[in-house]
Image (cartoon, rainbow, N blue to C red):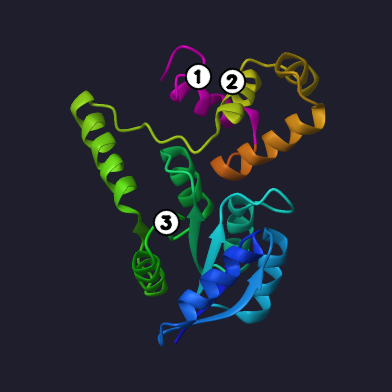
Amino acid sequence: MIKILLVDDHAVVRRGLTMLLNADPELRVVGEASEGNEGIQRALKLNPDVVVMDLSMPHGKDGLSATSELKKQMPGVNILILTMHDDEEYLFRAIQAGASGCILKSAPPDELISAIQSVAQGNAYLHPSATKRLMEEYLGNVKQGNMDTFNPLSDRENEVLTLIAKGFSNKDIAEQLVISVKTVETHKGNLAEKLQMKTRPELVEYAVKKGLLGYGL
């Protein structure tokens, strides 16, 4: 019996998934949560085999942040990201956060069940269209001789990183990007967590290697 925790901000979606998954004799939904923080607490209490985590939850902690935090507290938990975004950036960020895989909300029921069974066994799962695009991107990079293309950062985080590397202060960055200093600090914290880099020299070196300053190492 695979124990499943559902984390999604829509009660109707949770109810539908619960009915679908509980109809399979090998699966059992043991709990639900409406946002990331609640999902973390429920997971710690229920110790599920698989957490099916919605990516976009506007109220409370989002799916990526919750995944990253939950993996720190429960390294052995398997997290399957449920998303409507068929986009490489979200896929890369989910994997970087520690997810075992991603599946689209538009996927047929039997694919969702197969994905849950796969990650429960410790395997990775990517929906077919993502696998195809990743292979195409990989082969294209091989042909171009460029294998260092993975970037887990969002466009805004890249902008903040570039300005950090150029020596701008938090206040200067906030003024240039028309955001608050607090938001800049949040982005810097995300950068440090995603890249596992805490010092400015490390961030500068990374920015240079990625060509964010117009030249590379």
Task: Identify the image quadrant of the N terminus.
Answer: bottom left
Which secondary structure lies at badge 3?
Answer: strand
**Magenta stretch: includes residue 215:** yes
- Quadrant hosting residue 193: top right
Question: How packed is label 1: few (under 14 Cα within 10 Å), some, or many (20 or more)?
Answer: some
**Left or right of 62: which side holds 146?**
left
Residue at mark 3: 103
Real-space Cα separation, disc 1 to disc 2, in angstroms: 6 Å
Q: Residue shown at 61%/20% (left/top)?
A: 165
Residue at mark 1: 212
**Front: mark 3 or 1:** 3
Real-space Cα separation, disc 3 to disc 2, in angstroms: 32 Å
Residue 119 in the image: x percent, y percent? 40, 68
Q: Is residue 49 visible?
A: no
Question: How packed is label 2: few (under 14 Cα within 10 Å), some, or many (20 or more)?
Answer: many
**Numbered badge on residue 85:** none
Q: Is residue 150 above or below residue 126?
A: above
Real-space Cα separation, disc 3 to disc 1, in angstroms: 31 Å
- Label 2 sits on what residue type? Thr
Residue 75 in the image: x percent, y percent? 54, 67
Q: Residue most toward the left?
A: 143
Dot 3 or dot 1, earlier in sequence: 3
Q: Residue shown at 50%/19% (left/top)?
A: 212
Q: Is label 1 in contact with label 2 (beta carbons under 8 Å)?
A: yes
Residue at mark 2: 162
Task: Identify the image quadrant of the C terminus.
Answer: top left
Q: Which residues are magenta?
A: 199-217
